[in-house]
Image (tube, grey):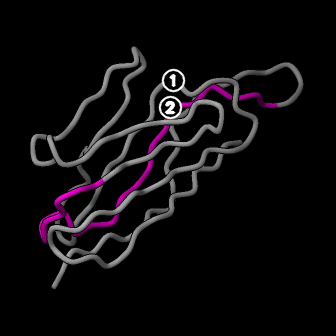
Amino acid sequence: QVQLVESGGDLVQPGGSLRLSCAASGSIFSINAMGWYRQAPGKQRELVAAFTSGGNTNYADSVKGRFTISRDNAKNTLYLQMNSLKPEDTAVYYCNADVTYHRGTFNVMRNDFWGQGTQVTVSS
């Protein structure tokens, strides 16, 4: 199986910065796509930024120019650099990955995985 563990969430003042990390571990054969989502209280989970299976990046309009997604393929780790944070960025941030992984000696499977989430609070 595959595990995603996020870290880096914190309380920060408006205008501040945070860097989130998501480390993927397990019997990984390949990570096909990977991204960040967030869910604020009373709202649906929404895409923040992601790498597509083709290697392109997608950003929500609300974070363009402020957030940057990056990854370290050797470490199977995804990052989200968040600058100029606003109160409306307050949410639980989740890592998501489309992963092909080994199951047993001869089987390879593909599935979608989520991390447990990390809280980002932007408040003065």
Q: Give amino acid for label 2.
A: Asp
Q: Quadrant of the C terminus?
A: bottom left
Would residue 79 be found to the left or right of residue 85 on screen?
A: right
The one of 58 and 69 positioned closer to us in this rendering? 69
The one of 3 and 104 positioned closer to us in this rendering? 3
Would residue 68 be found to the left or right of residue 32 on screen?
A: left
Q: Position of residue 85 (x, y in %)?
A: 18, 63
Q: Position of residue 95 (x, y in %)?
A: 44, 49
Q: Give amino acid for label 1.
A: Asn
Q: Are marks 1 and 2 in contact (CB under 8 Å)?
A: yes
Q: Residue at x 36, y 46 (%)?
A: 36
What is the magenta range? 82-103
Going from N to C along the chain, the mark reached first, 1 or 2, is 1
Classify mark 1: residues with Cα within 10 Å, few (<14), some (14-19) or many (20+): some
Q: Residue at x 38, y 29 (%)?
A: 51
Tell how many labels: 2
Which numbered circle lies on residue 32? 1
Q: Tag 2, which secondary structure? A: strand
Classify mark 2: residues with Cα within 10 Å, few (<14), some (14-19) or many (20+): some
Q: Main secondary structure of the magenta part?
A: strand
Q: Residue at x 50, y 63 (%)?
A: 7
Q: Residue at x 26, y 44 (%)?
A: 47
Residue 121, magenta (yes or no): no
- Identify the residue at the far top of this view: 54
Up/down of 54 relative to 97, above or below: above
Residue that mark 2 sits on: 98
Q: Position of residue 2 (x, y in %)?
A: 66, 43
Q: CA distance from mark 1 to mark 2?
A: 5 Å
